Amino acid sequence: NVEEEVLSQVDAAVRALEQEIAAHLQDGRRGELLRSGVRAVIAGPPNVGKSSLLNLLCQRPAAIVSPVAGTTRDVVEVSLNVSGYPVVLSDTAGLRDATDPIEQEGVSRARDRLQHADLVLAVLDATTVPTDPAELGAALGSLVSPPTPCILVLNKADLLGGHTGALCDACTHGPPLPPTTLLSCKTGEGTDSLLQLLGRQLAQLCGDPLAGSPSLTQSRHSTQLGGCMAALALYRQQQDVGMAAEQLRLARRHLGRITGHVGAEDILDVIFRDFCIGK
């Protein structure tokens, strides 16, 4: 027989555990981003300076730069440290309706990277970008889907000759735009402003690793916590004390796979799964 007070204490402990695990699962993959790097993708139409931007940020000629549109065919990837945050920066092919089969493959790979990006640097030509706020928003929408964090980079600002009033009005009026900056990859003007915007976006994505509870750094941690939550949910549905205790045991087993506290059953599972026994 189990005393009623014991069951109420267990229920309270389970509720507290569920709240703590839920907070970990809702951390926006911050731990994974800090461990593996934020996947930042440079995207835009051909010949707007995407490869020049990659070279500017990594301070070396990592990508080929040419005035010929469509030079970049494959994804060029570099690892950076920006404001203390790890970033995996990818330069991609210019987005357009290509006719060349090789360029079509490059555009397909670029769109695939955009679908899996944590952050997008959307690059447009400041000299040709529409100054109408609605048209500017449409041009950006053709590159980035709304849920993905984005920084709008208006490159080739050195060719504007200081006439930026209409462009600035388009950015500040009309539909709200993501953080926007003028940049000249040729002269370096606007680089500090871009790095500040990039640092703020990375801080929002990754958070402060020194504040709060430890972050989940691997996807398997999230998987095991999800299994623990499922077991705790089944615990609440049980009327029989023995069945409820079994669900708590399963929940503890999921947590043990994270902390390293595993039992004989787990060891036997590994042996029979990974080794040929009795053959």
Image: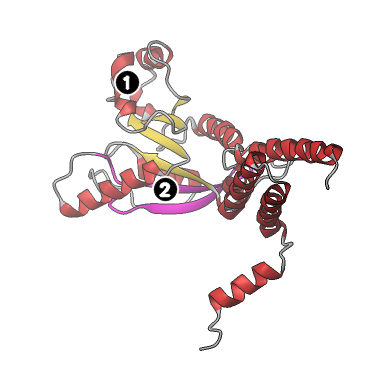
Quick check: is 79 in the magenta stretch? yes
Badge 2 density bin: few <14, some 14–19, many ≥20, Cα 10 Å? many
Residue 22 vertical position relative to residue 36 in the rendered view, above or below: above
In the shown orientation, is residue 148 left or right of residue 134?
A: right
Indicate the position of residue 120 as horizontal and vertical percent values.
43, 37
Residue 198 vertical position relative to residue 75 in the rendered view, above or below: above
Indicate the position of residue 72 as horizontal and vertical percent values.
29, 50
Q: Which residue is mark 1?
A: 136
In the shown orientation, is residue 113 left or right of residue 86?
A: left
Q: Residue furthest front?
A: 1
In the shown orientation, is residue 276 left or right of residue 263?
A: left
Q: Which residues are the magenta region? A: 71-95
Indicate the position of residue 179 as horizontal and vertical percent values.
48, 25
Q: Which residue is mark 2?
A: 90
Q: Residue furthest bottom?
A: 279
Residue 189 vertical position relative to residue 106 in the rendered view, above or below: above
Residue sitting at x 49%, y 44% = 57
Residue sitting at x 61%, y 35% = 203
Q: Quadrant of residue 84?
A: top right
Q: Is residue 92 visible?
A: no
The numbered disc on residue 11 is: none
Residue sitting at x 43%, y 30% = 147
Three-letter residue code for mark 1? Leu
In the shown orientation, is residue 60 left or right of residue 259?
A: left
- Secondary structure under tag 1 reads helix
Viewer-nearest residue: 166 or 2:
2
